[in-house]
Image (cartoon, rainbow, N blue to C red):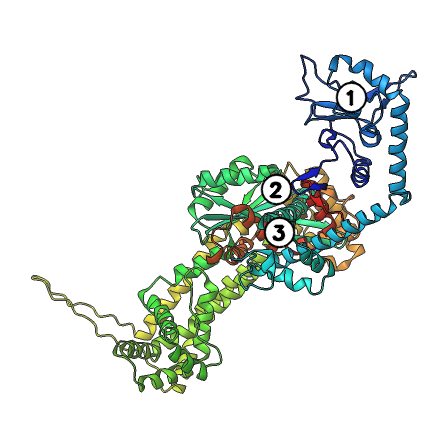
Amino acid sequence: MSLKLSENETLDFKDCGTWPEKIIDSQRTYIVKMRMNYIEKLDLTRSEREGRSVNVSWFFKNLVNGNQCRRTWLSYSKSKNALFCVPCKLFLNSNEKNMSKLALDGFINWKKVSERIPEHENSNIHKKCFCSWKMLEMSICEGKGIDIELQNEIKLEENHWRLVLKAIIDIIMHLAMENSAFRGTDELVSNIGKSNQSGKFLNLVNLVSHYNEPLKIHLERHKKGSVTYFSHEIQNEFLEIIANKVRNTILSQIKSATYYSLLFDCTPDISHEEQMSQVIRYVVVNENGCEIVESFLGFLQVFKKTGEAITEDILRSLSNHSIDLSYCRGQSYDNGANMAGKWKGVQARISSINSLARFIPCTAHSLNLVGLYAAKCSPELEKFFGIVQKLFNFFSSSTQRWDILKEHLKLSLKSYSTTRWSAKQRAVKSLYLQLGQVIHVCKLLKNSNLCEEASVELNGLLKGITSFHFICMLIIWNKILTAIDRVNVILQKQNITIDLATQHLKGLINFIEKFREEGIEEALDESKQKSTELSIEPVFPSIRVRKKKKMPGELAEDESSTLSEENKFKILMKNVCDRILNGLKERFDSIDEAAKDFSFLDGKFLFSMPTIQFKKHAMDFCIKYEKDIDKNELILELDSFTQHAIQLDNKLIDARPHEILNFILKNGLQEAYPNIFTAYQIFLTLPVTSASCERSFTKLKLIKSYLRSTTKQTRLNDLSIISIEHQVAKSIDYEDIINEFASKKSRKIIIK
């Protein structure tokens, strides 16, 4: 902080050359207080005069016994390029005769310094001023002396400013965590509370001032041109400080965890700029055990979407955050060729630098693609989903029709998305549960006065949803989509591990296989029952076989298909199931392989597997992770752990890797089994999905919205990390924020 001298002048306690000739008591007290425990950092790069420069040795006095004593009273002024005596500058009377240059406008004759400094420090005048200096320091420390009232006033003023800044920080934190806009069109402090265009920040300042006395006083004594701390520049400074503290906390956790995995994904923002979300997955070890964490580090603007360019951006970002790529043990991206490509994709380029950075494609994205491609294997399937979407569009395009629909339905119809499988499931489920009511509403609207275009559209939709074929499709897809969506939701959890993901995927495969053999028949029976309830004939419409004209010379007749329409439908749905099964088996090879590598760490295998077998698994594991694990020590540790750990807790037989690692930590066994501890840590670090990146895009759309499209990248990142990592942001001490804010620049203290 700095002391205000006049409207355009401030006092810099560090530079004696900027001090006025006549120093008043308030200024003297302020300077002495600020220089207490202050160690001057000597910057002598521009101190040359007539071929000579200031020598660091001048600031030390050599004693007879060989020791050195620091001359704290001697100070170098960069503004004047001169040496000053601090106590004499502060306390020497201007009427004193034979005043030294060190106490006036500075000593600049470098040739005579070695003579003048000892001469000055041995003078009575200097010693008197020096004693006065130290006496004032003591009175400030003890709160005694003639300046006690002034000191108390300064303390009160400092406390007032701290309370004001705390209120401002609170408002900034609240708006950042709520993803709200700060600024309005009228940001004049004089209009706070009067204008409705002041923006949320100033309006909240006005609201909080009703209950916060320091903030109220600050607003009342505001004058035009004085300090307010309400400007958008100050907001940016506070946001930057808070965001850096959050980011540094996360980075320290990543470095203490040693191993980590990379999760990156890209999306365009409202300004049509490509933003890449940066998320790091790692294991946090604390007094409560271990916790799998996926932390957001910020958005990175991407200008080229090639695998090479994105890899360079990722490596540059890791370098800027001082994250060592050699400790990366996993990567997870979407299935785009630029990210997942085997030869030129990001995963291939990073794997070429660090072969232990195992790539696992985002399982949620892969599962979505499996269902998406299965739903496109036949025009009949595309027609079914087209009817579902057109039905929603028909009602949602008219408020009147939507109101009629809401009167008869408990759950509104849903739209579906080609990229989000869960949206497709909600759309089908809503129609499946309320098909009868939807048909009833369509018949009501058919008898109403609709325009010709809407009437034609409604007749087509009504014909489509009242066919037995559509009902069969609806019931079968509802069962398939529900099973896929249930697994999809589980896979997107932050703390899921590859062993659990593999189990759920195998469970889905078993469900689809069983449904293929038995479920289709059951669904047809249910469809017939539902059709009967809706007064719809439960029969597949027969399609006339088109006969080809005989060409000259042809004798044989065309053989017509002997398959019934029902059997054709069964074959179609079995083909869908086959596509889903093939997709599941092809797309999840990598995660299945990773799960097999770490399978011996599961409690069921670890404590029941024969010794020879788990030693073989351990040896294979050590070959892959020879940089992290000592194979001889690991085998000895596993042999000992399986014998002694079970005696401490017999529940370990059924324990998951996460539970076993928690057991090791809670019982302090990591020192006895360091290689086992490392193996479990690497295992839990491996990613399953990049869903955390997708979740950060939701915040991106809220922060960089249509009305905030010009938000700069730095502010966007600061707001995003505070909002996404709000738990870390809440733990930051406001005093630390204020202290860092004050240390960045000289601020004004108004003394009355």
Disc 2 on helix, strand or loop?
A: helix
- Amino acid type at circle 2 is Asp
Contact between labelled residues 1 and 3, with CB atoms less than 8 Å apart: no
Q: Where is residue 665 in the image (x, y as percent from the top left)?
A: 76, 51
Residue under label 2? 620
Residue nearest the viewer, comparing 61 with 362? 61
Tags 1 and 2 in contact by the CB under 8 Å rule?
no
Residue at image coords 55%, 58%: 181
Label 3 SS: loop
Q: Which of 534 and 413 is in front in this view?
A: 413
Cα gap from disc 3 to disc 1, whole angstroms: 41 Å
Q: Residue 609 carries which label?
A: none
728 shown above or below 374: above
Between discs 3 and 2, the one toward the N terminus: 3
Tell me which residue sits at (50%, 62%) in the image: 509
| Quarter assignment of residue 27 | top right
Q: Nearer the viewer, residue 565 or 463?
A: 463
Mark 1 falls on what kind of element?
Answer: helix
* Horizontal side of residue 272 vs 49, given as left or right: left
Direction from residue 262 to residue 426 in the image, left or right: left
What separation in Å lies between label 3 and label 2 (alpha carbons)?
74 Å
Amino acid type of disc 1? Lys
Residue assigned mark 1: 101
Residue 518 visible: no
Q: Find residue 355 and report its image quarter.
A: top right
In x, y percent, where is residue 340? 46, 46
Classify mark 3: residues with Cα within 10 Å, few (<14), some (14-19) or many (20+).
Answer: few
Question: Residue beneath label 3, please?
Answer: 224
Q: Quadrant of residue 627?
A: top right
In the picture, the quarter occupied by the N terminus is top right
How far across and down, in percent of the image, does residue 310 sit? Answer: 47, 41
